[in-house]
Amino acid sequence: MSDPSWQIRPECAEDAPLVELLNAVSFGPGRYAKSAYRLREGVDPVAGLSFVAVDGSDLLGSIRFWPVAIGMDKSLLLGPLAVQPGLRGRGIGIALMKHAIAAAREQGYPSIILVGDEPYYVRVGFARLAPGRIKFPGPVDPDRVLGLSLAQHNVMLTIKGEVRRARIDHFVSASGAAVAG
């Protein structure tokens, strides 16, 4: 897609219902049971790091990042990354990630983590982390834990510990994930 008719822009408040609908279509109700969702519950996405791909008024895809702590280190949790089902494979998701990763680097974040399919995310620089290096709340397939260093030195080699929310913005039930201290 060397000359797409669509564009990437920051997500705005009016996009939120469409992004939520896209996430529901893309991931279904099972998304709420995932460990990564526990880290997002009660937390707003990082300001300036939520983007949408649009063609006019049509939402084609979206990406968001969430503040997390790994041990004593701050990081970002990527997700969800969603693209309209009929448009997958056209480069929208990769373009969203490249754009958002550049913005995260500009904001000074040292790293990004996610739980996902390595063959897809390796295309923008993610790599599988050594099993046990970081621990998500709840069950996560260790082969799907990926990381990307944004710092000049590879911080993914030194980060170690439990992944926790870096903050809480809204009331969370007692069963929510721990908050970094």
Image (cartoon, rainbow, N blue to C red):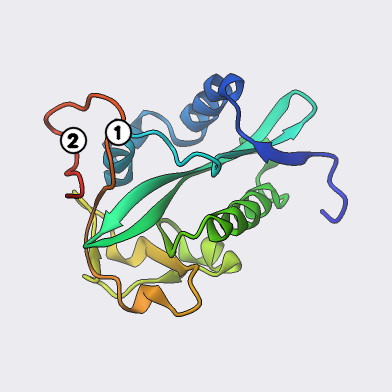
Q: Is residue 130 left or right of residue 14?
A: left
- Percent position of residue 164, x then y: 23, 50
Q: Nearer the viewer, residue 116 or 96?
A: 96
Quadrant hosting residue 74: bottom left
Vertical arrangement, residue 10 with respect to residue 172, above or below: below
Residue for badge 2: 176
Identify the residue at image location x=53%, y=62%.
121
Quadrant hosting residue 102: bottom right
Vertical arrangement, residue 21 with respect to residue 158, above or below: above
Q: Nearer the viewer, residue 63 or 75?
A: 75
Quadrant hosting residue 54: top right
Q: Is residue 113 left or right of residue 151?
A: left
Identify the residue at image location x=51%, y=35%.
26
Q: Amino acid at mark 1?
A: Glu
- Percent position of residue 114, x then y: 40, 56
Residue for badge 1: 41
SS for callout 1? loop
Identify the residue at image location x=31%, y=30%.
169
Mark 2 neighbour class, 10 Å CA radius: few under 14, some 14 to 19, many 20 or more: some
Vertical arrangement, residue 75 with respect to residue 181, above or below: below
Residues tagged 2 and 1 counted as in contact (Cβ below 8 A): yes
- Percent position of residue 78, x then y: 45, 50
Q: Amino acid at mark 2?
A: Gly
Identify the residue at image location x=13%, y=33%.
175
